[in-house]
Image (cartoon, rainbow, N blue to C red):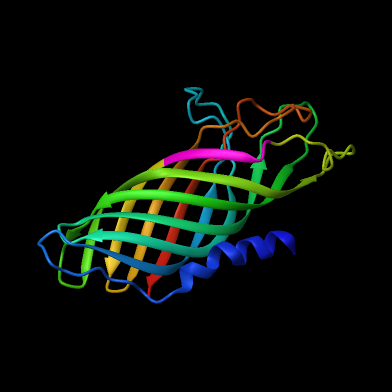
Amino acid sequence: MRHFSTFILFMSPLVSVAQTLPEDNQNVMRVEWGLTAAFDLNIPGDWLSIDTSQETLLGYGGRFGGVMALKWTKGWEAEVAFTIGLDRLPLPVHTSQSFKVNLDRWSLSLPVTAGYIFDATEEMGIGPIAGIDLSYSLRNHLQSTATVSHAEEPLWKPFNLSWGFGCAMKFGRYEVDVTGWFGTINLLRRNSLNLPSPCYPNVVRVGVKYFL
């Protein structure tokens, strides 16, 4: 309940009516507020490794929250979002025994992106975006088929900083983003499960935004 109250406190200004600055020059900036929801395709692992024999495991998740956008008439824009989400990360275990490990985690995320949108029509635009994403894990739950459970051990680092790039598509008040995020902080605090290290929380995220 405490985490939910904190989320509501941060979300309250993001449901305000859209604000627009006076358009008194050619490159005027306007501020827009909106809501966002996203689907996460989680691919934990070492994206810096050149070892092609690594097993690729896929997990799923989702998140929702609010977004603030700064937009210029010449096509440049920047966005800041605040979201809460639940993700499942399947972890590759290096052991002679055969068992599966899934890490479920609730997290807060603060992605900051910028890009340039090219107008295809008056109501549609497309362009590249890039940015960083700071996230904090509120709660972790480990599901394992192993006999010994490590669910209560402090194995995981709560913070992560990711960098990413992708593409944004505009349709009137709606925006669809497809972004790949690459983690830079190792998930593991202690490697009691014999996981490959480092293990970064990488994500391919498909998000939908609606601006008020």
Specify the quadrant that holds the C terminus. bottom left
Q: Is residue 160 magenta?
A: yes
Residue depicted at 70% across the width and 29% down the height: 195
x, y percent for residue 120: 15, 64
Q: Is residue 190 above or below residue 69?
A: above
Count of marks, rendered view: 0
Q: Would residue 141 appear left or right of 32 to someone viewing this image?
A: right
Q: Would residue 170 appear left or right of 185 to someone viewing this image?
A: left
Q: Would residue 146 appear left or right of 91 to someone viewing this image?
A: right
Specify the quadrant that holds the N terminus. bottom right
Q: Is residue 175 above or below residue 89?
A: below
Residue depicted at 48% across the width and 65% down the height: 66
x, y percent for residue 84: 59, 59
**In the orientation shown, which residue stands out farthest toward the right?**
147
Q: Is residue 55 magenta?
A: no
Magenta-tinted stretch = 157-163
x, y percent for residue 8: 61, 67
Name the one closer to the observer, 70 or 97: 70
Name the one closer to the observer, 52 or 197: 197
Occupied quadrant, residue 118 = bottom left
x, y percent for residue 193: 77, 30
Residue depicted at 39% across the width and 71% down the height: 210
Residue depicted at 29% across the width and 61% down the height: 169
